Image: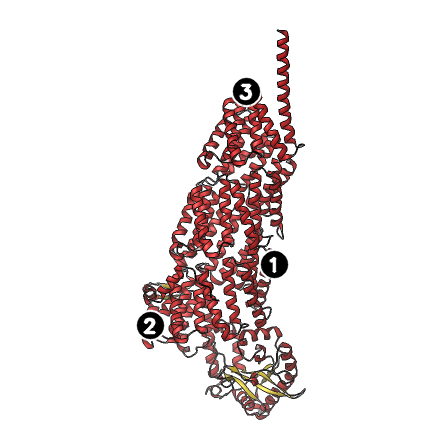
């Protein structure tokens, strides 16, 4: 079933694309774009070096051939193979006699069949070759005989053979692909004279027992580097065991040309340029001029290109130039100019045609890579119009749907992308069947869309289907298989199956290393996957190592001014942010931004994302105004690209909401989060990771506002949703356990808080390091609970663990260390170690002062803590001022009913009581009590603390009845929170007992006075 497209924006855009105006406007802009020169950059130097070496090879090869065959008789040798009739033209299938045979005469079915037959055929083949060579030797007088060398190597390795079969013949029918490998039995003959070589070829052609399947005379049509030889694939009859036929290959060389070829190492240049020249040798001379033009110097002048575009109407030459600029030099603006010229040539000649389809597709692909997604969508749509008109719903049209789907996926128009890929599948399955490699590509595209939709099980199913086809087609160690292992790893990572994800990424990397070596650009993708996984696991040093490996490869391959390099800089910046190395992070993001500006211009999605990253750095530094500015700048760029209802826009609303929350602008924060929630819900459905994430932000906002019950309800819904989306050991699930633990702690449910924090820690440690920043966060939370329970030894152990990890990871001057210092200070204060508490609070404030903005509320609460300590140490005036400052900030940011404000009122009460200002102290405690009862309920341990503080002031004011009532309430709450035998209960009972004793003494003294009276 085709899924109905929900995105009205996409539908209206598709309708607009049917009109020609938009495409014509794009092409007009391309033609008007003034490109000055191409400076051959580091990324292109390798290409230019190959060009120059290649031209040298070509020149010397041509010269040597003229010397060994002055009359060019070898070029005139007529070779007729059966290559023109091996297809059944009506069906497109291959003839059965063109398949390799097993020893029983049936087509081979696997590598084992082929090897068994080849081992028997090899001596027969060698006998044929050596017999013909001996005949040639006897036919010539010693004066012209010269050397003849015969080389018969071992059978080609099975790994190489299977690889070649799957790469080159997987589309051939009848199958299997392995039955079309003709060179497992092979040999070469090297002659010193052209006459001997021609005589050998004549013997092969004239032997009635030999059937030539395919032949190439490269003396007539040299390779790109000018190398010349003859290659013949022929079938022999093998009679040793049964009767079967086997196809073998012989390469026939001239010694002088082969020696020169080895000296020049021309094969390297052939491999480098093979793709550039593939399938179009008709305009070779013109192409050589183009290569000579590049090889001659370090620049291509725009004037020269303009002249070429005005004068050249050679379709093949223009196509090749476009591909050269696009794929080799990376000069995309020049490439689209060439493709645009090609469009004009074809329009002048025949109007709408397949070449137009080629050009629109190529221009669309370039614009897609440049981030001009709307323009790319328009051109893919034009290509689709042409293809539908010319071909109907066939595989060419399916290619247009693929382009549209992939652009839509980048735009996060995921329903539309899914619809396109389902159309592709509907077209291709009847053509190829369900087990064809092209079907695997469609499954892969659908899997990637599903992953981004949060449909992780469906995504996994698609990738596994694709993988099954690819393994069946290519074997276990093909690069295509490596790609799918990586896709499965990314899904597993999102599901929280980090061990399985790592296994998939490592399998992918191993295949690539085996296939391409250690320095191929494909490895950088695997290093990035492993780095991102390590980052999620908190293994930040290893993550950095992986990203640096990938970056080194990319710079070597592409040079620094490349989009892939920018992505690696971004990854390194994100790790640096996690480590607290904000200067380095900013440097990495700025480098990425600089590259993206040069490649894409200012108004691109990639540039916008770098502004977002820089905004996150500013947020980490506490510069919320700058963070807000960066996020808004990103929003301004992305809104025209994606529209207002796109998930990318929703992500920015989350960023802006987070900043507003940090600023204490809770109404604005809620508005941002709710906008994001609406967009994500429509894009992905209610049961998606994105929606769960936004609800988590809303829960934290409710907690910050003091709405703890509402926050608890939200987090419980988030947890239920995440457990349906992710595996139970996912780090995403651990985050929600943390959130629920924080609520339980704030509500005074210390046992529940401890249990929930332990669940979070257990989840974080599942298959991951126990010294990661995530683990440190859990240790700190467990320490706070232990401290509030009076378990100071446990609290110290937890705080010390957190501090050790965080200081090692982030350094000693980071915000997280400030938090650790405050935690240690509170514990020391509770233990009565006021000097150490003072040292810790002051250290915390010193660090926080470096990060103005984000930590304003944190500073306020720490100042209130320091005030109590200073008061106990005799600095009452300083303590009074600090409390007043803290209260002013909190009332401004949080309002007068927030439980954090209550905490500061409580501390202010302690400071005022110490100063002897008992009336003001009583007011402060009563304010704290009123807020805490409303926000936290009657059974919270913090409420007990305030009752006890108030009781102390009332006792000093000689209000025994009031003091007794306050102590009684504190005692009852603490018994409920901690049990009858807890130290806190004993402390309150002691104060209550002291008051009772005082009242009893007062009563006795009163009776004594009455008696005396």
Q: Earlier in the sequence, mark 3 or mark 2?
A: 2
Looking at the image, residue 943 lies above or below residue 687: above
Residue ID for mark 3: 957
Q: Position of residue 213 (x, y in %)?
A: 54, 85
State the residue in front, 81 or 712.
712
Q: Position of residue 686 (x, y in %)?
A: 49, 54
Q: Earlier in the sequence, mark 1 or mark 2?
A: 2
State the residue in front, 272 or 1.
1
Residue ID for mark 2: 344
Q: Secondary structure at mark 1?
A: helix
Q: Secondary structure at mark 3?
A: loop
Q: Quadrant of residue 434?
A: bottom right
The reply to whether residue 496 is visible in this rendering is yes
Q: Secondary structure at mark 2?
A: helix
Quadrant of the snapshot with the C terminus = top right
Q: Mark 3: few, some, or many residues within 10 Å (few <14, many ≥20)?
A: some
State the residue in front, 363 or 645.
645
Q: Quadrant of residue 483?
A: bottom right
Q: CA distance from mark 3 to mark 1?
A: 67 Å
State the residue in front, 746 or 47.
746
Looking at the image, residue 565 lies above or below residue 316: above
Residue ID for mark 1: 500
Q: Position of residue 849 (x, y in %)?
A: 48, 37
Q: Position of residue 944 (x, y in %)?
A: 58, 31
Number of numbered markers? 3
Looking at the image, residue 724 lies above or below residue 806: below
Q: Mark 2: few, some, or many residues within 10 Å (few <14, many ≥20)?
A: some
- What residue lies at 51% left-to-right and 51% top-to-bottom? 692
Q: Which of the two discs, 1 and 2, sits closer to the camera?
A: 1
Q: Which of the two discs, 3 and 1, sits closer to the camera?
A: 3
Q: CA distance from mark 3 to mark 2?
A: 97 Å
């Amino acid at each position: 079933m085709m899924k109905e497209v929900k995105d009205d924006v996409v539908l209206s855009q598709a309708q607009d694309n049917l009109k020609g105006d938009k495409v014509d406007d794009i092409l007009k802009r391309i033609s008007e774009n003034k490109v000055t020169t191409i400076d051959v950059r580091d990324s292109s130097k390798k290409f230019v070096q190959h060009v120059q070496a290649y031209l040298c090879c070509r020149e010397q090869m041509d010269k040597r051939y003229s010397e060994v065959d002055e009359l060019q008789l070898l070029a005139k040798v007529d070779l007729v193979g059966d290559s023109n009739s091996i297809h059944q033209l009506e069906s497109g299938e291959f003839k059965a006699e063109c398949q390799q045979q097993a020893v029983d005469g049936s087509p081979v079915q696997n590598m084992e069949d082929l090897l068994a037959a080849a081992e028997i055929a090899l001596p027969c083949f060698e006998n044929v070759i050596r017999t013909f060579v001996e005949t040639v030797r006897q036919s010539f007088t010693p004066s012209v005989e010269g050397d003849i060398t015969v080389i018969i190597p071992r059978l080609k390795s099975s790994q190489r053979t299977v690889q070649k079969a799957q790469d080159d013949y997987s589309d051939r029918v009848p199958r299997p692909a392995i039955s079309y490998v003709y060179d497992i039995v092979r040999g070469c003959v090297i002659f010193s004279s052209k006459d001997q070589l021609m005589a050998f070829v004549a013997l092969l052609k004239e032997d009635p027992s030999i059937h030539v399947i395919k032949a190439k005379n490269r003396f007539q049509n040299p390779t790109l580097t000018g190398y010349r030889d003859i290659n013949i694939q022929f079938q022999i009859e093998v009679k040793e065991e049964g009767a079967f036929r086997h196809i073998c290959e012989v390469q026939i060389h001239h010694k002088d040309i082969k020696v020169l070829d080895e000296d020049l190492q021309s094969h390297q240049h052939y491999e480098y340029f093979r793709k550039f020249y593939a399938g179009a040798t008709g305009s070779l001379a013109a192409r050589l001029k183009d290569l000579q033009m590049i090889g001659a110097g370090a620049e291509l002048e725009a004037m020269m290109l303009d002249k070429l575009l005005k004068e050249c109407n050679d379709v093949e030459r223009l196509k090749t130039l476009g591909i050269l600029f696009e794929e080799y030099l990376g000069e995309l603006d020049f490439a689209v100019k060439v493709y645009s010229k090609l469009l004009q040539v074809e329009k002048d000649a025949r109007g709408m045609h397949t070449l137009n389809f080629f050009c629109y597709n190529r221009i669309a692909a370039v614009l897609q890579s440049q981030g001009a997604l709307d323009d790319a969508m328009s051109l893919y749509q034009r290509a689709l119009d042409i293809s539908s008109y010319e071909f109907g719903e066939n595989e060419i049209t399916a290619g247009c749907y693929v382009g549209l789907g992939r652009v839509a996926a980048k735009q996060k128009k995921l329903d539309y992308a899914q619809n396109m890929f389902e159309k592709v599948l509907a077209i291709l399955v009847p053509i190829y069947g369900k087990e064809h490699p092209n079907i695997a590509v469609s499954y892969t595209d659908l899997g990637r869309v599903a992953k981004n939709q949060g449909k992780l099980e469906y995504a996994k199913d698609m990738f596994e289907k694709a993988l099954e086809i690819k393994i069946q087609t290519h074997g276990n160690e093909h690069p295509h298989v490596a790609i799918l292992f990586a896709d499965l790893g990314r899904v597993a990572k999102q599901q929280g199956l980090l061990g399985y994800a790592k296994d998939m990424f490592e399998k992918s990397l191993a295949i690539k290393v085996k296939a391409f070596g250690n320095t191929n650009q494909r490895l950088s993708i695997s290093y990035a996957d492993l780095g991102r996984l390590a980052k999620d696991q908190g293994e930040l040093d290893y993550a950095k190592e992986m990203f640096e490996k990938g970056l080194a490869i990319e710079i070597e391959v592409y040079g620094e001014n490349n989009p892939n390099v920018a992505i690696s800089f971004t990854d390194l910046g994100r790790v640096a942010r996690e480590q607290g190395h904000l200067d380095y992070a900013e440097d990495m993001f700025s480098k990425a931004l600089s590259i993206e500006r040069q490649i894409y211009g200012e108004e691109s999605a990639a540039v916008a994302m770098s502004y977002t990253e820089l905004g996150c750095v500013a947020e980490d530094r506490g510069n919320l105004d700058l963070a807000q500015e960066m996020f808004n700048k990103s929003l301004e760029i992305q809104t025209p690209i994606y529209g207002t209802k796109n998930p990318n826009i929703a992500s920015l609303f989350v960023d802006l909401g987070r900043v507003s929350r940090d600023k204490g602008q809770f109404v604005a924060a809620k508005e941002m989060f709710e906008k994001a929630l609406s967009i994500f819900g429509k894009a992905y459905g209610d049961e998606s990771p994105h929606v769960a994430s936004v609800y988590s932000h809303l829960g934290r906002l409710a907690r910050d506002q003091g709405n703890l019950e509402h926050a608890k309800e939200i987090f419980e819904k988030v947890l239920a949703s995440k457990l349906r989306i992710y595996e139970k050991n996912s780090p995403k699930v651990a985050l929600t356990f943390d959130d629920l633990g924080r609520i339980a702690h704030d509500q005074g449910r210390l046992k529940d808080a401890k249990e929930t924090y332990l669940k979070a820690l257990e989840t974080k440690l599942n298959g991951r390091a126990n010294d990661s920043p995530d683990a440190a966060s859990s240790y700190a939370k467990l320490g706070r609970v232990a401290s509030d329970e009076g378990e100071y030894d446990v609290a110290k152990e937890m705080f010390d663990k957190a501090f050790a990890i965080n200081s090692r990871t982030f350094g000693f001057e980071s915000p997280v260390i400030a938090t650790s210092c405050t935690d240690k200070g509170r514990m020391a204060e509770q233990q009565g170690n006021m000097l150490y508490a003072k040292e810790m609070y002051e250290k915390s404030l010193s660090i926080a002062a470096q990060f103005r903005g984000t930590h304003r509320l944190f500073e306020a609460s720490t100042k209130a803590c320091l005030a109590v300590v200073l008061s106990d140490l005799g600095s009452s005036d300083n303590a009074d001022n600090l409390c007043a400052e803290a209260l002013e900030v909190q009332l401004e940011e949080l309002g007068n009913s927030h439980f954090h404000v209550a905490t500061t009122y409580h501390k202010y009460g302690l400071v005022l009581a110490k100063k002897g200002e008992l009336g003001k102290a009583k007011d402060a405690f009563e304010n704290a009590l009123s807020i805490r009862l409303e926000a936290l309920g009657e059974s919270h341990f913090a409420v007990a603390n305030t009752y006890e503080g108030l009781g102390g002031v009332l006792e000093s004011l000689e209000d025994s009845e009031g003091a007794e009532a306050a102590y009684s309430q504190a005692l009852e709450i603490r018994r409920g929170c901690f049990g009858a035998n807890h130290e806190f209960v004993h402390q309150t009972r002691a104060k209550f007992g002291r008051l009772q004793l005082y009242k009893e003494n007062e009563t006795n003294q009163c009776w004594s006075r009455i008696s005396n009276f």
